[in-house]
Image (cartoon, rainbow, N blue to C red):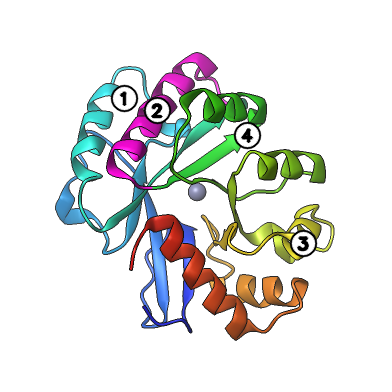
Amino acid sequence: MRSKIFIDFHTHHDRQSSDLINLQTLHVTPELQAESLPNTCSLGLHPWFVQLETWEAALANLVDLAKLSQVVAIGECGLDRNIDLSLETQIAVFKRHIELAEELQKPLVIHCVRAFAELIALKKNTKSSMPWIIHGFNKKEEVFQQLLKHDFYFSFGAAILSDRSPVTQAIATMPQGRFLLETDDRNDINIEQIYDRAASLRHISLETLQTQLVETYRQLTRLG
Ligand SMILES: [Zn+2]
């Protein structure tokens, strides 16, 4: 893998470029087929779209699809206290992703809204050995430090572009090897902007950041 490339670790958009690894994330339904998967992707049941009637069937499909080599991560999946679906159901669905990640030795990409205590408890109780990467992280310093202590990884996106965001400090001091970058569902920004901003907050060159994040990506996804 070359080192002067950009990695968009979590995006809902299809974008192709010779210097980009575009990790497109797809919500799995019972109908999703292997033929419609992008070259590099992450698959899971997003808590927003989990339906009581269909999630078991969607999960069975995920178990099949996730074995494919282009699926480099499991997710996004996770917990969200701002939605109607009960946290109990969300935890049940999320636990199945945790098991699958473990079985396939692929990292978990996590969506978490106002449920960090539950997330930390799950990580402790399941004793998962795979990396748990919280995507779109944008919480205050105390939460960040606590998650860091519990060995979580992070993927930072548009929030770091804002001077008011609490994560600009986090990314400036973040240990190397613990984070990646993303654009998520935004199509008004590109991953190059996020890289430029992260490099400047960390006082390193773009090239150095690129080399470091390729290394992080290889470690997290166990790709050569
Ligand atoms: Zn997303």
Q: Label 4 vs label 3: CA separation? A: 23 Å
Quadrant housing residue 192: bottom right
Residue that label 4 marks? 113
User: Which residue is denoted by mark 1 in the rendering?
Assistant: 55
Mark 2 highlights which residue? 50
Q: Distance between the residues labelled 2 and 1?
A: 6 Å
Answer with mark 4 or mark 3, whichever residue precedes in sequence: 4
In the image, residue 3 sits, relative to residue 191, either above or below, namely below
Q: Distance between the residues labelled 2 and 3?
A: 36 Å
Cβ of mark 2 under 8 Å from ligand 1: the answer is no
The residue that mark 3 highlights is: 173
Marks 4 and 1, how far apart at CA: 20 Å
Question: Dot 2 lies on which element?
Answer: loop
Residue type beneath disc 4: Val
Residue range (magenta): 83-106
Circle 1 residues within 10 Å: few <14, some 14–19, many ≥20: some
Q: Mark 4 CB in 8 Å range of ligand 1?
A: no
Mark pair 4, 2: CA separation: 15 Å
N-term mark: 2 or 1 = 2
Helix, strand or loop at label 1? It is helix
| Number of marks | 4
Disc 2 crowd rating (10 Å Cα; few below 14, some 14-19, many 20+) is: many
Q: Distance between the residues labelled 1 and 3?
A: 39 Å
Disc 3 under 8 Å from ligand 1? The reply is: no
Amino acid type for the residue under numbered disc 2: Val
